[in-house]
Amino acid sequence: MDAVLMQPEVSRVSWLLRQVMAHRKITNKALAERLGKHPTTIARLKAQDTLPEIGNAAIEEIRVAITELSKDRFGICPLSELLQLEEDQP
């Protein structure tokens, strides 16, 4: 019964902002302007491979801004497009 209840161990949460912005053709400048941030701040966020400690509200602001900048062409940006759970391999 324990095997049924066991959840896979998550070793990290991958941050896919770089890939999402490239796919949706969003520049650092455009996202920075939408968020009221400096383009260097966006570049630093894009450089992260694991989820940065920026908080839920900031992640949601980024997701909404990406949606607003690219909705006509790509639709809504779901959270699952920005984050990916990486499981430990046994």
Image: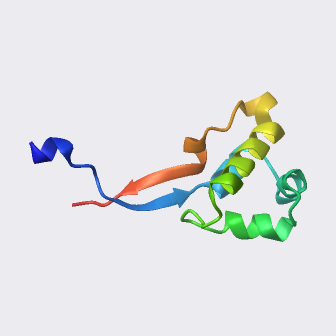
Q: Is residue 22 visible?
A: no
- Res 86 quadrant in image: bottom left
Q: Which percent across, then down, holds residue 32?
A: 85, 58
Residue 62 seen in this snapshot: yes
Decide which of 15, 23 is in the foreground and name it.
15
Residue 87 vertical placement versus 44 (above, below): above
Task: From the viewer's side, name the closer residue of 84 and 21.
Answer: 84
Toward the left, the furthest residue is 1
Q: Find residue 6 and report its horizontal and vertical position in percent.
A: 21, 49
The quarter in which the N terminus is drawn is: top left
Coordinates of residue 62 in the picture (x, y in percent)? 73, 51
Please give the name of the residue rendered at 71% of the width and 30% of the height, measured from the top-left corner.
75
Seen in the picture, residue 83 relative to 46 is either above or below; the reply is: above
Q: Relative to residue 1, is residue 56 drawn left or right?
A: right
Residue 29 located left or right of residue 58:
right
Q: How many marks?
A: 0
Q: Nearer the viewer, residue 59 or 82?
A: 59
**Residue 76, x across and y down, in percent:** 69, 33
Q: Residue at x 21, y 61 (%)?
A: 90
Q: Residue at x 70, y 65 (%)?
A: 45
Colouring rule applied to residues: rainbow
Residue in the foreground of this view, choosing between 23 and 11: 11
